[in-house]
Image (spheres, helix red, strand yellow):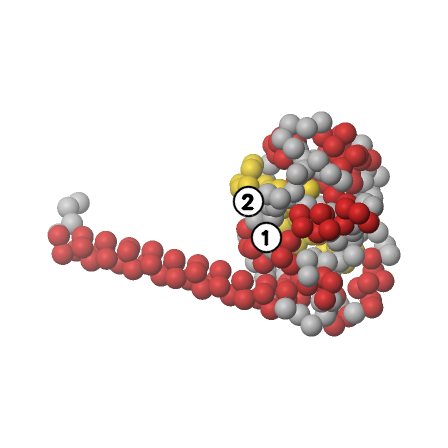
Amino acid sequence: MVLHRRTLNTVLSSAVLFAIGLCAAADASAQDTTALLQKAVNGSWRSAAHRARDRYRHPVATLRFFGIQPNMTVIELAPGGGWYTEILAPFLRDNGHLIEAAPSKFEEKIKADPAVFGHIEKVVPFAPPREVTLGPPNSADMVLTFRNAHDWLNRSPAALDAVFKAAFDVLKPGGTFGVVEHRAKPFADAEQSSKLLHRIPEDYLIALGLKTGFRLQGVSEINENPADPEDVNVHRLPPDLAGPDGEHAKMKSIGESDRMTLRFEKP
């Protein structure tokens, strides 16, 4: 069939307008997501100490890089003191689901502030390598871990492997595994660096993700710190400043650790 030129132009114009409409809708959606994240970051429930770390952790940019949306089912691994939970819980409360993989004592933090954390769906036991089941297979849109990978590697390489496998299993096809971790020098011995410095080489985690079955969807320098020499224990840097008093000024001038930010996808 041969289309008349005017008909062809109409078809092409409609296709262009449709594409423009899709782009506009995508831009609006991205703006809405960013605004919701920023609202959570600006929340009055966040302490001054937690806010002070935003400049190093870049929560809005990091979560946007991972592709988070407010209607997702998200699992946060080992939330620690809940720094990111204070952002994720309000962001997901209306349309999404947040699951915390944490020790049972984390429920105390949730119960202490129901206005912020009351809509967290549940806390699942998580103690690698003994307990790593995160939920039914293919049930989550996103799994996130922030500066935890070295803790699991310090238990054993098998423990870290089990965490990656658990994340892979619980994710839906197309789901995202977002990883932020203290970065060691390239091709350093992973186990030694992890134990001595609490850092892992970026190539080691990328290789582990690929071995697990993930695709590497992106590598970002959102959380890089070029001033970090990557040869000091991360706890000597802010905010811990665990080294001798005489080095505190130097460590403060460096800032928090240099961090890799990796986005994996389950095929």
Residue at horizontal 79 percent and vertical 34 percent from the top: 196
Residues 198 and 78: in front is: 198
What SS does tag 1 mark? helix
Does residue 98 appear anywhere in the picture? no
Query: Which of the 4 quarters of the picture holds residue 192?
Result: top right
Q: Position of residue 245 (x, y in %)?
A: 82, 49
Amino acid found under the numbered disc labelled 1:
Thr
Amino acid found under the numbered disc labelled 2:
Ser
Q: Which residue is mark 1?
A: 62
Residue 11 placement, left or right of 135: left
Q: Earlier in the sequence, mark 2 or mark 1?
A: 1
Task: State which quarter of the image contains the N terminus.
Answer: top left
Residue at horizontal 45 percent and vertical 64 percent from the top: 28
Residues 213 and 81: in front is: 81
Task: State which quarter of the image contains the C terminus.
Answer: top right
Does residue 219 appear anywhere in the picture? yes
Residues 195 and 236: in front is: 236
Q: Which residue is mark 2?
A: 220
Query: Which of the 4 quarters of the picture holds residue 183?
Result: top right
- Can you say whether 251 is above or below 39 in the image? above
- How far apart, in angstroms, are the residues tagged by discs 2 and 1? 9 Å
Q: Position of residue 83 (x, y in %)?
A: 72, 58
What SS does tag 2 mark? strand
Decide: marks 2, 1 in contact (CB < 8 A)?
Answer: yes
Q: Position of residue 193 (x, y in %)?
A: 74, 32
Query: Which of the 4 quarters of the picture holds residue 186?
Result: top right
Residue at horizontal 29 percent and vertical 60 percent from the top: 17
- Can you say whether 119 is above or below 160 in the image? below
